[in-house]
Image: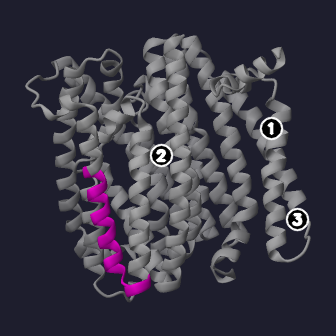
Amino acid sequence: MLASNSRTKKTITNVSFAFLGHFSNQIMTFVVRTVFINTLAIKYLGINGLFTNILAFLSLAELGVASAMIYSMYAPIAEKNYKKIHVYMTLYKKLYTIIGISILLIGCSLIPFLNFFFKERPNIPYLEFIYFLYVLNSASTYFFSYKGSIFRADQRQYIVTNNNTVFTFIQSIARILVLLLFKDFILYLFISIICVFIQNYVLSRKADKVYPFLKKKSIDKLSKQEERSLMKNIGAMFFQKLGSVVLNASDNIILSKFAGVVFVGLYSNYALIIGIIKSVFNTISDGIIPSVGNLCATGSKEQSEKIFNALLLLNVWGMGFCCICLFVLLNPFIELWIGKGYVLDIYVVLFSVISLYIQMTMRAAEMIKNATGLFWNDRYVPFIQCIINIVVSIILVQKFGVSGIFIGTSLAMLLTSFWVTPYIIYKHYFKKPLYHYFLRLSLYTIVIILSGALTVWASEYLLGNKYINFVFKMACCCLIPNIVCICVFGQSTPFKTILNLLGVGRILKRQVKC
């Protein structure tokens, strides 16, 4: 019972700090983006989106080391086996140093082939040097950053979140000043490199202070069995990383090749907002996974399944709500924020939102898979997903335009990881038929679709100018989906589990007794 309460408190702490940190970070992100748009040409937005996604492919060198290492440390941390933790962290340092150097070398080797990624090369001076700065920034993230993993494995994700929040604020202020005073994109990039390096260094020193044994030199080594298990998990996570990167990074590269870098710049504003939603959900998930991992390592499968069902409802409800808001509000928001000239076709928004919903509703199953170490079982699925995604997206973008890219991404997920990941956890962990999962998910999705249709219908009423209409649409989005979900799910076991995990159930019981 004490362990359960401790896990709940740590989860709530991690999630609370994650939410507050991201709220603060995204406000600064919008301010920086607004200044960026008003001081630099839109082609720089396109270059930023394209080069960021090219470097995301190079991050495949990370091979899923972080997820495998964090999983390996759950048991030693629960057992307070500091020697074993130190061995893993020493190995982690060596691997990340090699990865950082590899990204630097491989990234630089692509410089002669940059023109391949453009439909037409943009008229931007020092383009190769700008790309090199992106490579340097990406490579530098792997030096010192490995120590943040021990906080994540120890259910102290909030320490990493707080560190990120502080340096995001500092970096944002510095970027704004550079843009306003100098209007220089290269100086803007130098700010990122410097801040990322200092941010990782400060987190490293914090880890040394909280876990002083990390400063000592480790002479112990993993056993052959532990090495094989770790390398097996890293190998499996490489394919998982591959699938994730292709889904998230290939869209801009295909856009640049078939639609041009200017369109990449236009879509990057939508990608920014969608990325914020994904980032918040992923950070919240990162705050929950260590507690789920601890539960899976020390609790029963019945407890784990109960928590999983609650996470599935919470995930679908939350993402469904966000997707409804995005579909209704994204174009009006872009128009109010930076002007009608930056607004894209509603079908681009629709298929972007569908792709986001499919990808993020799989997070509950992925959390259990990562917490239980079932990396190996579906190792080839992301590779198949990559092939489907790239081939179908390239075919459909030429037939349906930009919307075809997101249709291709959605089809790739539906044909592969959407059903394989839950199949793995139900077969190898819960040991139950898969239809339990899809019955729940289908019911939840039908409710989300109906509430979304009702919200779209209600938000079509026009009350006045565009500002009043936007506020009205926002009110519809906030109220209608959540009221519908509360009415449908309010008495369900997963919903009551969510309330109990948050402490709401105990508070309500005390009020009833009073």
Give above or below for 171 relative to 151. Answer: below
Give above or below for 344 relative to 91. Answer: below
Q: Which residue carries the number 2 mark?
A: 385
For residue 15: magenta?
no
Separation (CA) of disc 2 from disc 1: 32 Å
- Give the magenta part as a residue range: 180-201
Dot 2 crowding, Cα within 10 Å, few <14, some 14–19, many 20+:
many
Question: Residue at coordinates 36% horizontally, 80% vertically from top-left?
Answer: 185
Task: Say which quarter of the image contains residue 69.
Answer: top left
Question: Residue at coordinates 50% horizontally, 58% vertically from top-left?
Answer: 25
Q: Taken as a whole, is the magenta stretch helix, strand or loop?
A: helix
Determine which of the numbered discs, if any, sits on residue 395 in the image: none
Left or right of 249, for residue 212: left
Callout 2–callout 1 Cβ contact below 8 Å: no
Marked residue nearer the N-terminal end (3 or 1)? 3
The three-letter amino acid code for the residue at tag 1 is Cys
Query: Foreground residue, 21 or 132?
Result: 21
Comparing marks 3 and 2, which lies closer to the viewer?
3
Q: Which residue carries the number 3 mark?
A: 460
Position in image of residue 247 (x %, y %)? 48, 53
Position in image of residue 418 (x %, y %)? 57, 38
Position in image of residue 248 (x %, y %)? 48, 55
